Amino acid sequence: MDAMLLPAVDEDGAPFWEYAARGELRVQACAAPECGRLRFPPRPCCPHCQSFESEWRAMSGRGRIWSYVLPHPPLLPAYAAQAPYNAVVVELADAPEIRLVGNVVTGPDAPLNSVDPARLRIGAAVKAVFCPVSPEVTLVRWLLER
């Protein structure tokens, strides 16, 4: 695996990364019976009802590209050799209010530049795959669905 920046795993977000390591895409939700709304990024308190109760709900792993960019030139030296690559924002099919950032690749372990940028479109259907990049972090990446 090429050098890359790894996300910081904090107490609120740790369950997200633990589920990803098991190949599950889960999103934090308010566990207050009168609320139940999803939230991302994870945080200790519900922004809607201020409850501190939470749970992690399984998502299907399907979504649509909401936005994307092809960094030219890459701002970080660790990514220069992989250019051109994509960075996408994916709107989850199960929860359109939740958007996750990642990369569209041809397979879980494929390089960031494995998808021809001409294939990317706003609204394109994608599905989650999981790529372990360190002992602590498994990234959620995306495959284009045909």
Image (tube, grey):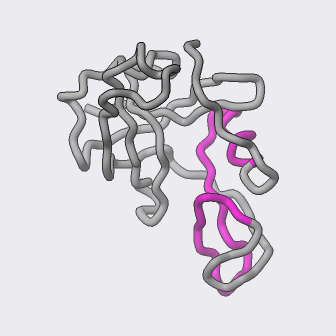
**Quadrant of res 137:** top right
Residue 81 higher or lower than 135, as above or below: above
Q: Residue at x 25, y 32 (%)?
A: 146
Q: Residue at x 75, y 80 (%)?
A: 51
User: Is residue 32 found left or right of 3 in the rendered image?
Assistant: right
Residue 32 placement (x, y as % from top left):
73, 80
User: Is residue 102 found left or right of 114 in the rendered image?
Assistant: right
Residue 7 higher or lower than 110, as above or below: below
**Quadrant of res 116:** top left
Near-viewer residue (5 or 50): 5
Residue lying farthest left?
A: 118
Residue 34 higher or lower than 61, as above or below: below
Task: Please state, as top left, top right, bottom left or bottom right, where the N terminus lies in the image.
Answer: top right
Q: Which residues are magenta?
A: 14-43
Near-viewer residue (37 or 112): 112
Residue 86 placement (x, y as % from top left):
35, 32
Q: Residue at x 73, y 63 (%)?
A: 55
Q: Is residue 29 magenta?
A: yes
Count of marks placed on residues:
0
Q: Residue at x 21, y 41 (%)?
A: 121
Residue 31 placement (x, y as % from top left):
73, 73
**Quadrant of res 140:** top right
Residue 7 higher or lower than 106, as above or below: below
Q: Is residue 38 magenta?
A: yes
User: Is residue 78 found left or right of 118 in the rendered image?
Assistant: right
